[in-house]
Amino acid sequence: MLRNIFGTDGIRGLANRGYITPDNMIKLSIAISRYYHKKYNRELKIIIGKDTRISCYMLEASLTAGFTSCGDNVVLLGPMPTPSVSFLTKSMRADVGVMISASHNPYHDNGIKLFNCDGFKLTNEDEIGISSIFFDDCGVVGEAINANLGKVKRLEDVAGRYIEFCKNSFPRNMNLGGIRMVLDLANGSAYKIAPQVFWELGAEVMAINVNPDGYNINASCGATDPKSLQRTVVSKRADIGIALDGDGDRIIVVDENGAIVDGDYIIATIATYWLNNGKLKTNNVVATTMSNMQLYNYLESIGLKMHWCDVGDKNVAAKMLDVGAVIGGEKSGHVIPIKYTSTGDGIIAALQILAYLVDGNKKASDISKIYKPYPQIFFNIHSVLSDDDLDKIRSCVESLGIDGKHRIIARRSGTESVTRIMIEGENLDIAEKIAQAVEVF
């Protein structure tokens, strides 16, 4: 059986334990280096970014040591959003992009996300290749010595480059003048950049949770906990609220009434806007199995075809490339506007939403009127169920005689020892009946 150090979205765990330790980061960087040396037959250029959690210092130093010990040259970005690493890896002609982040997890976790030279997450083949070298005990000593050791430099103009990249995704004939918005930056890596982007485009910007201290990233704030944003939008009478997660690749919108607009609605809105403005290369849109069936029905009603894929933004991106889609994402807020970027980007997705509102003179609350979602029930089973158990769940549901307008998704988490369950259907009573039958496992 092939061993894989990577999960659903990179490598993730408790900082300074398990895989997320200095010695394992040196091993990982040496494994990455050896894998790509064999592929390219030359020294590498590596981009490294990080979010604001305290353990990033430790992991950044360890990764840098490993890469330079193999003769590779490293460019350090400092605290920057994950999508900026994707963008800069491609624009600077680097071979590998590394983001040190545990995304929406609390500060005590950390992880590694990797990008190839085109700015996309690694393929399964690349992950298995790197993992094989890692588990073959590649050691913590690189091959380079003396003059062959790699060099390290810090990129000084990194923020300006990414700000201009984001702004270029907004229509040149528009501005955000008259838009009063609140940003919740989760005390994460977009805390400086995001306010500047929207302000330079003309918006009145109020930013909250922009004082990272190494420990408060994602703490009761951001895209996974937008309650403080909801309160602020209402109290400040803002037109819209935008919440990002700790590394800036996830977005949740709050309308002027304080209601949450999730990733499904964001995908639907961008797809609609681009369809109406001739920006869709094909009529294909991609979403994961956790998205609402009514998103599928809505897109079908306007002549678009939605393609389902497994959870994880790298799976979304792969499916998008396969079917030629330029917009896709996840209900959780990972939205990939591949017309502009090759990974989930909260700032660029927000700019497309704002363009839709400005162009149509609409309110943020109009987004939720696009369709009425089916009820969904989510819960975790606190064990990793076997394939047999998952088959039993499906058989149990089938025995209830439920019609085709209800479905169940059971999947093992890529980051925790739980099995995630989602039940959906147009009738809430039936969905709850399914949930009761499943909860016995």
Image (cartoon, rainbow, N blue to C red):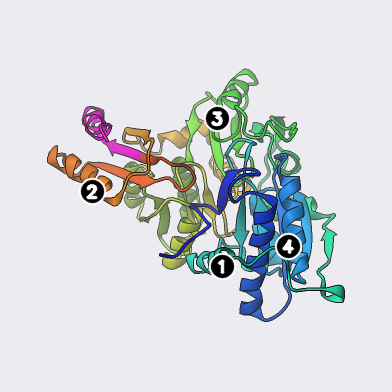
SS at circle 1: loop
Residue highlighted by disc 2: 391
The residue at the point 53 percent across, 33 percent down is 364
Q: Cα distance, mark 3 to mark 1?
A: 40 Å
Residue 57: numbered disc: none
Q: Earlier in the sequence, mark 1 or mark 2?
A: 1
Left or right: 280 as drawn, with respect to 351: left
Q: Earlier in the sequence, mark 3 or mark 1?
A: 1
* Image vertical order of residue 203 relative to residue 318, above or below: above
Residue highlighted by disc 4: 66
Residue type marked 3: Asp
- Which quadrant of the structure image shows residue 378? top left
* Image vertical order of residue 96 relative to residue 351, above or below: below
Residue highlighted by disc 1: 136
Single out the mark in the foreground, 2 or 3: 2
Residue 225: numbered disc: 3
Single out the mark in the foreground, 1 or 4: 1
Q: Residues within 10 Å of mark 2 (few under 14, many from 20)?
A: few
Q: Earlier in the sequence, mark 2 or mark 3?
A: 3
Q: Cα distance, mark 2 to mark 3?
A: 33 Å
Q: Earlier in the sequence, mark 3 or mark 4?
A: 4
Residue 432 part of the magenta segment? yes
Q: Earlier in the sequence, mark 4 or mark 2?
A: 4
The residue range painted magenta reads 421-441
Is there any visible trace of residue 172 in the rendered image? no
Q: Residues within 10 Å of mark 4 (few under 14, many from 20)?
A: many
